[in-house]
Image (cartoon, rainbow, N blue to C red):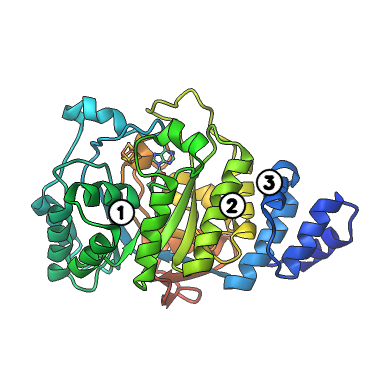
Amino acid sequence: MSDHSSLQTILASNIDADLKKIAEKVVAGERITFDEGVLLYEKAELGYLGTLANFVKEKKSGDKVYFNRNFHIEPTNVCVYTCAFCAYSRLIKQREEGWEMSIEQMMDIVKKYDGKEVTEVHITGGVVPKQDYAFYQELFRNIKAHRPDLHVKALTPVEYHYIFKKAKVTYEEGMKTMRAAGLDSMPGGGAEIFHPEIRDEIAGGKCTADEWLAIHEVWHNMGMHSNATMLYGHIEKFWHRVDHLERLRQLQDKTKGFNCFIPLKFRNGNNQMSHVAEVSVIEDLRNYAISRIYLDNFNHIKAYWAMIGRSTAQLSLNFGVDDIDGTIDDTTKIYSMAGAEEQTPKLSTQQLVELIKQTGHRPIERSTLYDAVKDYSEVEFETV
Ligand code: V47
Ligand code: SF4
């Protein structure tokens, strides 16, 4: 709940003049600048950030916290790229540990959810030549033919850039074709850190920041929506994070097509960057809060519980976050392979609702596009 007395305390206190000015701007609904974003990362302490981020969050979504009922499909964990942070990338050299699913295998996963109240399938994984333009069109068509109401949130610009280049089609033509085949929205992956100083180091070879942004822009210009992420807490400096947020804020000003922003904490298990220490929970919370404050044109900030863990996801709800993703049903391996504490990510609707209620917020089941599906604030589950 909003603690307006903390806000008044900040405004009346003797804190650093620059931080006070930022607080005044945020309270007045004004946008903060690049330099002010960097200053927040460098100087602002947790209590101050939580108070301001909570203020912004409550103006946007009150005491609501969203979740959805979803499952993932990871078509392959083999990849032509070798991003240094990725626990998948080494597998191209060790194919016996890898999988490449056929369309039938993926349809078998979809069919497992027949009769179950899921609303979204999230599809993303590695990049392999066989899973190409025709392959994904056929997959999307088959999913829609089997279950037209299931929202297909699939593939990132990393995959689309590769697939379209190979098929020799433009981004416009490619995205139109994917839409016609059944694509409903794009997840936020592949963004990593946009600035080339860092991107070239950790994710060299895959689509550039401009290409990532261009594919989202094309998609948004078709009236469609997508998410955005940032992989933080490794070798980047604070200003690289602000540069990343700034590029997203600029595109969102143009298109208004992003649904939500999802900060993704770097996990150091089983990858080429295992020597890089992970940042603290305090830094995770500061990062959620600064993202909420900086991205004034994004409606939602998501804490992906499968990656950050349930307790930090709960804490994040007082630092600007208003979404904790979905039920997942143990269908993703990206984070468990990189050492996240949630080794079998799966939460029932009841568990998600209770996690949210424990923090004093109102749990709302949403569709992918944030239409309310059900308000769970008054729902009492039967104890088993
Ligand atoms: O692009 C990979 C990240 C992303 C690691 O849109 C890692 O609703 C941390 O984008 N440590 C894919 N992060 C996941 C993703 C996502 C997740 C949940 C919801 C949505 C959404 C999108 O995972 C990759 C990369 O940035 N990632 N390895 C790692 N070791
Ligand atoms: Fe491939 Fe994605 Fe892993 Fe990079 S992060 S190696 S593109 S699966």
Side of 84 relative to 290 (left or right) = left
Depth check, front residue: 159 or 227: 159
Q: Which of marks 1 and 2 precedes in the sequence?
A: 2
Quarter of the image containing the N terminus? Answer: bottom right
The Cα atoms of the two marked residues, 2 and 1, are separated by 25 Å
Depth check, front residue: 70 or 383: 70
Q: Amino acid at mark 1?
A: Asp
Q: What element does badge 2 sit on? A: helix
Q: In which image quadrant can residue 113 be found?
A: bottom left
Q: Are marks 2 and 1 in contact (CB under 8 Å)?
A: no
Q: Nearer the viewer, mark 1 or mark 3?
A: 3
Q: Nearer the viewer, mark 2 or mark 1?
A: 2
Residue at 37% across, 73% down: 223
Side of 220 relative to 184 (left or right) = right
Quarter of the image containing the C terminus? Answer: bottom left
For label 2, the residue is 288
Residue 43 visible? The answer is: yes
Depth check, front residue: 254 or 94: 254
Residue at 66% across, 62% down: 54
Q: Amino acid at mark 3?
A: Val
The Cα atoms of the two marked residues, 2 and 3, are separated by 14 Å
The Cα atoms of the two marked residues, 1 and 3, are separated by 38 Å
Q: Are marks 2 and 3 in contact (CB under 8 Å)?
A: no
Tell me the number on the disc at residue 38: 3
Residue 65 visible? The answer is: no
- Residue 311 x, y percent position in the rendering: 53, 48
For label 1, the residue is 329
Badge 3: how crowded within 10 Å, few (<14), some, or many (20+)?
Answer: some
